[in-house]
Amino acid sequence: MPTVSNTKAKKLYLLDRPESQQSVIIAGYLSSPYGKVSEIQREALFSIFGGDFTSRLNMNLREDKHWAYGAGAFVMDAKGQRPLLAYAPVQTDKSKESVLEVMKEFKAITTDKPVTAEEFERVKSNTVMQLPGRWETNGSVRGSLDEIVKYGLPADYYKMYDKNVRALTLSDVQKLAKEMIQPSQLTWFIVGDKEKIMASLKEVGFDEIILIDADGNPLQPTGGAINTKSGN
């Protein structure tokens, strides 16, 4: 399967929804295919970053700022490159500020605020405690078998799963964060009231803001693009 390069430009795609009571923010890029990194490490990292209620994104935008009912991040399953997405439905008047906070969290976990021992131990402990119930239904067993076949995993992948979870270290997760979290590759998508949020979004520093319709098509003329660097 051919590899698609992520954009180097800082682009925002904006879908206008007049009178919307909130702005839905999505940011993401294409990450490595399934199996290129340890799934156990990845699951731990994203539990800390955006997968759990106590994740950094949710604690920031919901519990600290009170701008969102919930926020998070996850990596979608795929045989090829996997979409890595962060999301946050936020109050309209905090759209710009929320974008900046999401940007900050993406940068911080790879630089000045790496995964802490406390965060790591909490997630690892939760994962270990959930192991006994992981395959308690026929459906969950079938799902794991499907993954082995679908992604070409070793036949003993889940036989070794318990051992590999318990062997997970803080340095493993910190190293993966620097490898997998790439703030400069983010493409942004927002659904919200353009009249209320456009002016402030121009202040964020996007290279381009592209207005789109409900099907994702750029609006005319010239793709509905706004070069925020030139002030247009």
Image (cartoon, rainbow, N blue to C red):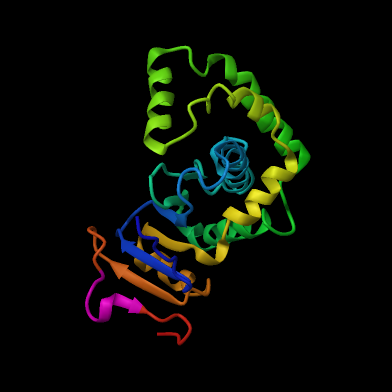
The x and y percentages for residue 182 are 57, 60
Give me the residue at 71% from left, 37% from top: 120
Seen from this angle, which residue lies furthest right?
A: 117
The x and y percentages for residue 165 are 64, 29
Q: Is residue 105 visible?
A: no
Q: 39 or 151: nearer the eye? A: 151
Give me the residue at 57% from left, 48% from top: 61
Q: 40 or 199: nearer the eye? A: 40
Q: 184 or 81: nearer the eye? A: 81
The relative height of residue 23 versus residue 122 in the rendered view (above or below) is: below
The x and y percentages for residue 41 are 61, 40
Seen from this angle, which residue lies furthest front?
A: 155
Q: Which residues are magenta?
A: 218-225
Q: Is residue 51 magenta?
A: no
- Determine the image quadrant of residue 132: top right
The x and y percentages for residue 193 are 35, 61
Q: Is residue 108 visible?
A: yes
